[in-house]
Amino acid sequence: MRVSKALGAAILILATACVPVGGPTPDKPTQPDELALKTLDFGALPGWGSTDLRPAFTGFLASCGKLLLRADGDPFGGAVVYGSVGDWRPACSAAKQSRAMPEPRAFFEQWFVPAQALNRAEAVGLFTGYYEPELSGSRKPSGRYRTPLYSRPSDLISIDLGSFRPALKGERLAGRVEGAKLVPYATRADIVGAGLKGRAHVITYVDDAADAFFLQVQGSGRVRFKNGNVVRVAYDGQNGHPYTAIGRVLLDRGEITREQLSMQGIRAWLAANPAKADALMNENASFVFFKELPIADPRLGADGAQGVALIPQASLAVDLRFHGLGAPMWIDANAPSADAKVADQPFQRLLIAQDTGGAIRGPVRGDVYWGAGQDAEHIAGRMAHKGKLFVLLPKPVATRLN
């Protein structure tokens, strides 16, 4: 699942689209992912001269607020080629010292060099989307409000394996202590069936189990109460079980076609098969826990993995084994329109890596944050598009690549 505090932190709807049906063929074994970077000129970025870069500059400025708190000698994050915090400090300092927003295109061209991200020699990767859903809630169970959103259990232990072995960077475990051993935590089916009495409190009850399921997939969302109050529920941990994409389960069983493989298609199946819905959702043993937060600015999302509020169409979730939080990234892909009847639109945009997720795996892989509301839901739920990824590196870092 997503590891942001929003998605926390881990999470993706369409992990289904990441793996070919049937898996790798025996005569073509899958090689381990490996980031390669190839520098080029800004003129080579498709659409660079015609896109509004102000949202990305705002996001970069927010990320710099975190970066400038770190020591120059600290690794920036991601692969070693990203250099150190000291390599990025001049660009961040220049951005922070601007009394007014500089012309963003000139700013990025002054301080950075673009480099195409490759997975070994493969230039094309997968880009999906996520959003912040809004659910209807009640503080007490009553009538249709029967599905609980739980806080982080008191006995849940999370471990960053990279703290023990560098080779395990980006890998995490979660469980509970039994005697002197760490054992797996309860699965989704266990939690749905038995609850978490005495270990976690219920933040709120919602009126739709499928909404709660997809909230966990997204990692954060908003809950609206009858009195009009709205609060944010943000990612605060996960039970440690791997994420299983229920869309792929339906596809493998022949319950839906590949053309129906979207969040909207999965929701339609759940609505049409209420007697089977719980069992299908329980095929995904992963379960996410939340914390309640106020909504300071309704235009922004919850904090991502970097601890800054996500900006619609300017924040990107990436694989932290390869990319560092705070890095500007140019995407050249297509994206759905909010209207399913309208053809896909070109998506050529600068975003800032500010989040991560359990389904975000690979050097040419990204999950675009689309914001809140129905349009964001319609776009994110149908986005699973091939495209190319370019990273903007500080000039000293780019020089060392050549």
Image (cartoon, helix red, strand yellow):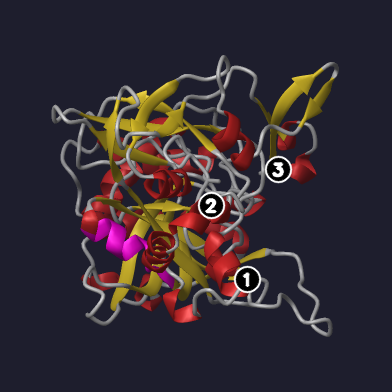
Q: Which disc is residue 368 wearing?
A: none
Foreground mark, 2 or 1, reads 2
Main secondary structure type of the part rendered in magenta: helix
Picture coordinates of residue 262, whole percent (x, y):
42, 68
Picture coordinates of residue 369, whole percent (x, y):
36, 53
Foreground mark, 3 or 1, reads 1
Please name the residue shown 18% across and 45% down the image.
101
Please name the residue that numbered disc 2 is placed on.
Answer: 281
| Left or right placement of residue 29 versus residue 393 in this view | right
Q: Which residues are magenta?
A: 375-384
- Counting residues from the start of the chain, the first of labels 2 and 1 encountered is 1
Q: Quadrant of residue 48?
A: bottom left
Picture coordinates of residue 92, whole percent (x, y):
38, 40
Please name the residue shown 48% across and 60% down the image.
366
Foreground mark, 2 or 3, reads 2
SS class, disc 2? helix
| Left or right placement of residue 108 versus residue 181 in this view | left
Going by the numbered disc 1, the residue's amino acid type is Val
89, 359: nearer the viewer: 359
Task: Say if the magenta span includes residue 94.
Answer: no
Q: Which disc is residue 169 wearing?
A: 3
Task: Count neighbours of disc 3 (C-alpha within 10 A) and say few if under 14, some if 14 to 19, many if 20 or more.
Answer: some
Going by the numbered disc 2, the residue's amino acid type is Met
